[in-house]
Image: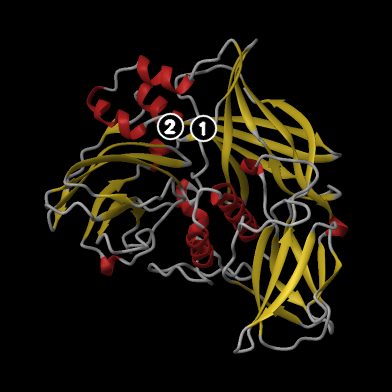
Amino acid sequence: MMQSEERLLKEYFNEVSREASEVPEIKLAVAIRNGVYDTRHRRKHTGRSFTIGGLAVLAIVLLFAFPRFAEHVGLRSHDAQGVLSARHDWGEFEVFRTAVGSNLTVSSALDAGLIQRVNSTSVEQNGFVLTVDGIAADQKGIIILYTLQNNTMESSQKFRVSMINEKQAQVGWYGPRTAQYAKPGITRGYEQILWGDEYTKMPEQLFVNAGVFSGDEHDVLFAGVENALANLSVPVALNKATLAKTGNTLQINKSLAIAGQSIEIKTAYIAATGIYLETEYNEHNSKDIFGLISPRLMLGSGNDFTGLYSKRSYELGGKQMLVFDNDNTSNEPLELRIDGIYALDKDATELIVDTGKQQIIKSPDDRLKVSISTTGRGKRTMLLELYPPEQKVSATYDVNMILDDRFTDGEGIAHTKKYENVSLFVSKVDTTQKIKPTLYYYNIGSEALPQPLTFKINSYPNPIKEKASLSIR
């Protein structure tokens, strides 16, 4: 499995885990089924196909979906976000204060005057008008302030806002992607988008696109533009020479040691759209690391700190990036703190299952149970029940079990499994232990295979708690 795709899939499932408790079970299952893709072979994403085998769009759209956290220590017991917003006059952007809310990165970019008015024309179609009011772009992403005006009398339409290229394909990694209602009159909003490639490889011109759909459209985030009531695109030019001068890159080149494993911090890029730490797990580590527990940047000094929590990670140009909120008005010291890692010994990343006997022969621990169901058409589904670890970790920072899409049968022949109807945090309670397992459904086909089946584990929620810290600025 290509490393970038493996990490993207890991991040996708981990994001879904964090949001699962707030999403109805049926909608969650559909969302995951639509969002997961074949991780063995990279396929170029074209048009707006959101099927298995295409780009993991759900992974992208959930990248900014974490709750906004704040850690306050010592003297700073107030809401830093609220105070910052109240201190500064946003001028012509003051009308966006309600829309921006408590987003620290966006509000502080406005406080610092980093979001600039753009000379773009409005676009109108079928009674809807899209205007791009302001942007702040840097080497890693862009913040967009927009206005959508609904001149119709209808109040049930829904809309999404995306950044697309001239081929109408979405680009970048997206912020909160809940569909919004295009109420009559003016709706103001913002988007935080991370570049999906090095900025030097981005097109010279992109488009901010608003797709407006009927209220009956259930899947607005993934609906094709051919179903749109209005498809509005405003051009935005990227000046790469200007982007090259944005932000501040710090050379860190230091390591953290947790449970004998080395986590290397290469660089920190601090700019309008966030703080980006380039990380790398040492290839000589004895464990496979699947994620970090509660990574955060502590902003401040003495007894006065504010915690900026990492809400996403992604791969850019072969580099693994941790992304944090940024207070664009502060030059105070920054310290990275981590509470541990999710990891397994490299020789413990196999899951061996006899699906005929419905038995687990080998697994990292005793928290897994397996069962097999067969439909009338002979299709077999493997259900894995994973019970929580003894070391409790907030679901906010939990990772999920992810199996490689390739597995081998008892004769060593490779097969490809399909992710289908995956459901997380299903309301099933063990009658004896009174705890909820996480359920994973895998379609393993209708063919009777030689037993047992061997799966490679690409992610597993095995927390190893150990605190570590490192000065960043």
- Tell me the crowding category of disc 1: few under 14, some 14 to 19, or many 20 or more residues within 10 angstroms, Cα based: many
Image x and y of residue 315, in percent: 59, 50
Q: Nearer the viewer, mark 2 or mark 1?
A: 2
Using the numbered discs, state the Cα–Cα distance from disc 2 to disc 1 in whole angstroms: 8 Å
Name which residue lies at 74% across and 50% down: 388
Q: Amino acid at mark 1?
A: Asp
Residue 368 is at least partly visible in this image: yes
Residue with the most extreme front position: 431
Q: Earlier in the sequence, mark 2 or mark 1?
A: 2
Q: How many discs mark residues in the rendered view?
A: 2
| Marks 2,1: beta carbons within 8 A | yes
Image x and y of residue 454, in percent: 80, 73
The secondary structure type at the circle numbered 2 is loop
Q: Quadrant of the C terminus?
A: top right
Colour scheme in use: secondary structure
Q: Amino acid at mark 2?
A: Asn
Image x and y of residue 471, in percent: 68, 23
Q: Which residue in the protein does label 2 denote?
A: 103
Picture quadrant of residue 280: top right
Asked if residue 344 lies left or right of residue 73, the reply is right
Name which residue lies at 35% across and 44% down: 238
Q: Nearer the viewer, residue 6 or 155?
A: 155
Image x and y of residue 430, in percent: 73, 57
Picture quadrant of residue 396: top right
Numbered badge on residue 249: none
Name which residue lies at 44% across and 42% down: 141
Residue 2 is at least partly visible in this image: no
Asked if residue 290 lies left or right of residue 333, the reply is right
Q: Which residue in the protein does label 1 denote?
A: 325
The secondary structure type at the circle numbered 1 is loop
Asked if residue 291 lies left or right of residue 314, the reply is right
Asked if residue 50 lies left or right of residue 284, the reply is left
